[in-house]
Image (cartoon, helix red, strand yellow):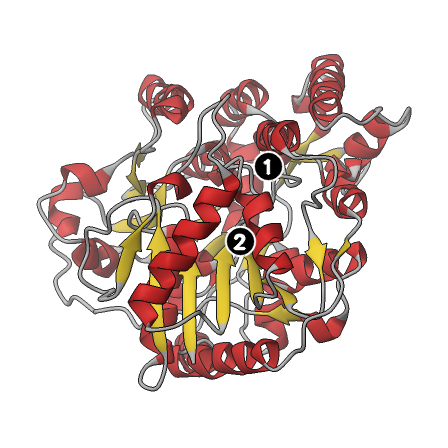
Amino acid sequence: MRVAIVHYHLKPGGVTRVIENAVMALGEGMDVVVISGETYADEVLHNTAVVPDLRYTGKDEKPDVDALVKKLCQVAHRALGGAPDVWHIHNHALGKNSAMPEVVMTLAEKGAALLLQMHDFAEDGRPGNFAYIHRHLKPDVPLYPFSERIHYAGLNGRDVGFLGEMGVPQTHLHLLPNPVMPFAQATSRGAMDELACERLWLYPTRAIRRKNMGEFILAAASAEEGELFASTLAPANPAALPVYQRWVSFAQTFALQARFGIGHTLDCSFGEIIAAADAVVTTSVAEGFGLAFLEPWLMHKPLLGRNLTAITADFEQHGVQLGSLYTTLTVPLELVEMQALQRTLEKELQQTYRQYRRPMPKDAVQHALNAMLPEPDLIDFGRLNEPLQETVIAKVLASQALQAVVRRQFFRQPVAQATIVHNCRIIADIYSLPAYGIRLREVYANLAARAPGPIAALDGDRLLNCFLAPARFCLLRS
């Protein structure tokens, strides 16, 4: 079988890592070329090609669709010795390249078999991307086309469910969770000497906004003597740096037992930093697949922090035990200035609905507020934005009783060694590279065997409704 995998770029991390794993998992007997808009700089992939017009496009930039499709077909044919049996295209509707939806449609009209894998959605907290892709989309071109030879893949049960709500039949819809690779273990805890702490609670993340660093800092506000809360990496995107630097300054101002960006400053490997950690932490309010909930167990580390049940339901179905995580971290509602919160919610909701070209429901603010209050007198801290979080943390720092309330929730349940072993075994089995290869081969074979048929448009409005529900609204994603 000949397969052409298409993505905008092959920069380290994210989708590139998934593509690398996919090629390794497929192994022998498959001819695969990976086509992107930029040169690949690593050594994992051995058959790559560059089509420059696949790269991210600018505000008023749109490549010639026919020329781009022709070039893609030529490059794939040359690399594979024939036309692809399957085109595996990543994030075609995300709003990163203005021509990509039309490229997909043109290939479909040529009878190509297409697997459209969705890692992220413009409909999910990315209104700028949504507006961009629709501004460049021709009226007769569906953003989400459907035919016998077009299948969709999602990373988790939630996304697969939402795609099903849009109208993708189950026969054309695939749950394709990412593989999780074993982690090279380090034995040295030398990082502890540099960090000068007795216990290390580590957040191994690039500290972008949705990672909810304020909640991590709230936990640090309850730290006991000898503890250190530390994150590993600063944001790579300059636009994300002001929020990050604001938290760094806040922690320094209040002399919190917290450090940021230790991956940039410590003279030791990432493996040694992990080895030094007493537990791995996640406080993120939004994830795609959810590697953060799986990788720590393969590192033989307990996991603490926020459970995103829409993401982790798949893992728990397979038996992964996540009882150490909380679904909400609540603080007394009286710590929040309600008028300021309601004004902020109304402003951000209005802006979000406006960007999505939708009228805001009259009860949207109340629905969003209700979702923030698991109990009438308690509010979920992770639903607040940074200024409101700062105000709450300052009040928690002034009260030992409040610090104890936070600490009881954050360290809600000790993790037994047997749980670590249990989770490690399940994850290594269910989410292994060989298991991923088997799933992917089955999807390709199913798709390639389909005969061409008429092309229809799926109802993208129904997908947007799933993501835009006010009860899902989070200020850290507005």
Viewer-closest of 323 and 150: 150
- On the image, numbered disc 1 is attached to which residue? 382
Q: Amino acid at mark 2?
A: His
Q: Secondary structure at mark 1?
A: helix
Q: Amino acid at mark 1?
A: Gly
Viewer-closest of 186 and 151: 151
Q: Quadrant of the N terminus?
A: bottom left
Tell me if I can see residue 301 in this picture: no
- Left or right placement of residue 212 versus residue 337 in this view: left
Q: Earlier in the sequence, mark 1 or mark 2?
A: 2
376 above or below 160? above
448 above or below 344? below
Crowd class of label 2 (few under 14; some 14 to 19; many from 20; radius 10 Å): many
- On the image, numbered disc 2 is attached to which residue? 119
Q: CA distance from mark 1 to mark 2?
A: 23 Å
- Left or right placement of residue 37 versus residue 128 in this view: left
Tell me if I can see residue 243 in this picture: yes
Crowd class of label 1 (few under 14; some 14 to 19; many from 20; radius 10 Å): many
- Left or right placement of residue 157 versus residue 77 in this view: right
